[in-house]
Amino acid sequence: MPVPKVAMLAADGVERRDVEALRRALEDADRRVDLVAVQRGEVWAMDGLDKAATFPVDVTLRDARAGSYESLVI
C-alpha cells in the first residue's frame, strides 16, 4: 500500500517552526510530505523577523496535481 501524500504549500517568509512542526507531525502519522511552492529551488523561512532557514521545493504549484495528494496544508 503506498504512503499517502500531503501537499504543504509554502512561500518565502514562512515561519520555520511551523513548517518543521507540521512536517514532523505528518511524517509521524506515516504521510509523505511534498513542499509545494510557486518557484523551483527553495523557500526561505523566518524565525520572527529574522531569516532562519531554507527548505527545498519538491514540486512547483504548476506541476502539482490535486489527485496525487490526500490533503493540503496551507
Image (spheres, helix red, strand yellow):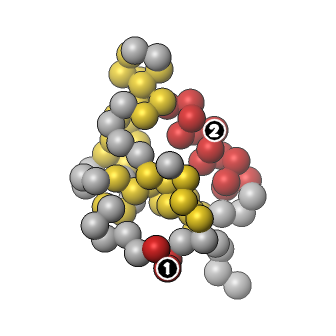
Residue pictured at 37% horizontal, 69% vertical: 64
Check the image and report above or below for 24 versus 52.
below
Q: Nearer the viewer, residue 57 or 36?
A: 36
Among numbered discs 2 and 1, the one appearing first in the sequence:
2
User: Residue 29, relative to residue 48: is it above or below?
Assistant: below
- Amino acid type at image mark 2: Ala
Residue 10 relative to residue 5: left or right: left
Q: Residue at x 48, y 30 (%)?
A: 15
Mark 1 sits on what residue? 67
Front one among 20 and 18 = 18
Q: Which residue is mark 2?
A: 21
- Tell me which amino acid carries mark 1: Gly
Q: Residues within 10 Å of mark 1 (few under 14, many from 20)?
A: few
The residue sitting at the top extreme is: 49
Query: Mark 2: which secondary structure?
Result: helix
Looking at this rendering, what residue extends furthest in the right direction?
29
> Marks 2 and 1, how far apart in space?
25 Å
Where residue 48 appears, as percent x and y from the top left, is 46, 17
Q: Looking at the picture, how far across and down is residue 30, in whole percent?
A: 71, 63
User: Residue placed at 50% from the left, 49% from the top?
Assistant: 74
With respect to residue 74, does 60 lie above or below? below
The picture places residue 14, in percent across and down from the top left corner, at: 43, 34
**x%, y% of residue 22?**
62, 44
